[in-house]
Structure formats: C-alpha cells, structure tokens
Amino acid sequence: MRSGYKVTLGILTIMILVTMTIGTSYSYYSVAKTQEDPNVLTSTCFDISYTEGTNGSIKLDATYPMSDEDAISKITPYEFTITNTCTTENATDPVNYEITLNTLLNPASTLPLNLVKYRLDQTTPSATTGTSTLVSNANQYNLDTTIKSENGIDASYELASGTLNPGESKTFNLYLWIDESATGDVMNQTFTGRVLVYSHM
C-alpha cells in the first residue's frame, strides 16, 4: 500500500473513533426527567343573574313631553337587580358589568333619541341618584356583534358600569320619558328598547 493511502485511512479511523466516543459519552452522561403530576387548569365561577322587578317593563302609553321633576314623580320606573351568583368559595375576583340600553331592529323606534330622556338610580346596597340626560348623549357601547344579532339590537348605549364582588347584588331603577322640549311632532311616535347587562372579567 502506498503511504499516502495509509495516512488517509489512519486519519479517517481516528475521526470515526473520536465521533463514536463523543456520542457514547454524551448519551451516557445526559439525563432525562419526566413530569410525574399532571398540569391542572381550573376555571373560576363567572356568572351574573338578572331579575326584573314586579312592575315589568316601562310602559309609555299615551305619554307626553314632561319636565325631569314630573317624570320622576309620575313614572313608575323599571326595576331590575343584577347579582354575582358566584360565592367566595368558588371565586374570589369581582365581575365587571356594563348596563346598556339598546334600541331594537324590530320593532324599530320612531321617536328620535334626542327627545328621549333617562335616569338610572341605584337603590341597593346603597342609594345613588343618577343624572337625567338624553339617550342620544349617552356613550355608545361597542357590544359584541353576535350578541347584537341574537337579541335584534340596533344600537347600544352605556348607562352605567361597575363591579360585583362574589355574592353581591345591586338593584337599579330606570326612568324613561319624553323630554319637555319635544313638540307635537312626537305624536304617535314610539320608543322600543331593552336593557342588557354585559359582564366580563
């Protein structure tokens, strides 16, 4: 054999032996561990109940334009209660809520929203008096399109927002009336709306 061939064969043999030694040493000294207990992800309780008062919905049959004072003294408000039905045993975080007044697609309102006034008062757990304002001045709420579609909602207006601790309830009175600035053009016009409470974390 030629000496150059022997040298090349010797170098290749040494390289193969070195590669095998490194691979064997790595596998001998490497350690693999496996998790023994499973990972567990448990969701917390997240639910708000909505209860209407005994008066049912607001009925503005044969109504007429009136002042704020007359409206509050003469109209029976729409009463509703929202409750965080979770308890401190299955949830610890408060739930955020948005109370919205929503105009409907069917039947659609014919009374302009710049003539419809509202006031939302909280009666429990502590009494707070809301501000009388036009529905058209309320902030529009970006309600989820799926919720709007399922409930036949045209536009959504934010009336109030806040948080409910586990087990906590709040009761509200909603007044709706035609503003005293309205003229005879409002005769035979209607307003149809629905209260919706949207909850989120």
Image: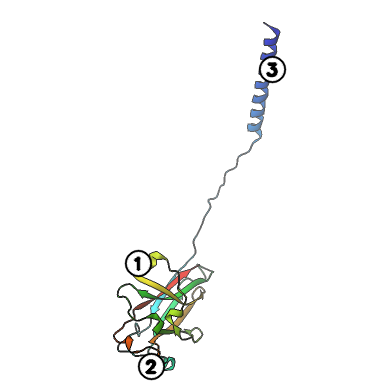
Q: Which residue is mark 2?
A: 74
Q: Residue 175 lies in what quarter of the image?
A: bottom left
Q: Which residue is mark 1?
A: 150
Q: Residue at x 42, y 80 (%)?
A: 135
Query: Closest to the observer: 151 or 17?
Result: 151
Q: Position of residue 118 (x, y in %)?
A: 42, 84
Q: Which residue is mark 3?
A: 11
Per the rendering, the mark at residue 25 is none
Q: What amino acid type should be assigned to the residue bearing mark 1?
A: Glu
Q: Residue at x 33, y 72 (%)?
A: 105
Q: Of the two numbered discs 3 and 1 on the same chain, state the one appearing first in sequence.
A: 3
Q: Position of residue 43 (x, y in %)?
A: 49, 61
Q: CA distance from mark 3 to mark 2?
A: 106 Å
Taking the view exactly as shown, the residue that stands out farthest to the top is: 1
Q: What amino acid type should be assigned to the residue bearing mark 2?
A: Lys
Q: Of the two numbered discs 2 and 1 on the same chain, state the one appearing first in sequence.
A: 2
Q: Residue 83 lies in what quarter of the image?
A: bottom left
Q: What amino acid type should be assigned to the residue bearing mark 3?
A: Ile
Query: Closest to the observer: 172 or 130?
Result: 130
Q: Residue at x 35, y 89 (%)?
A: 183
Q: In this orientation, does residue 127 appear?
A: no
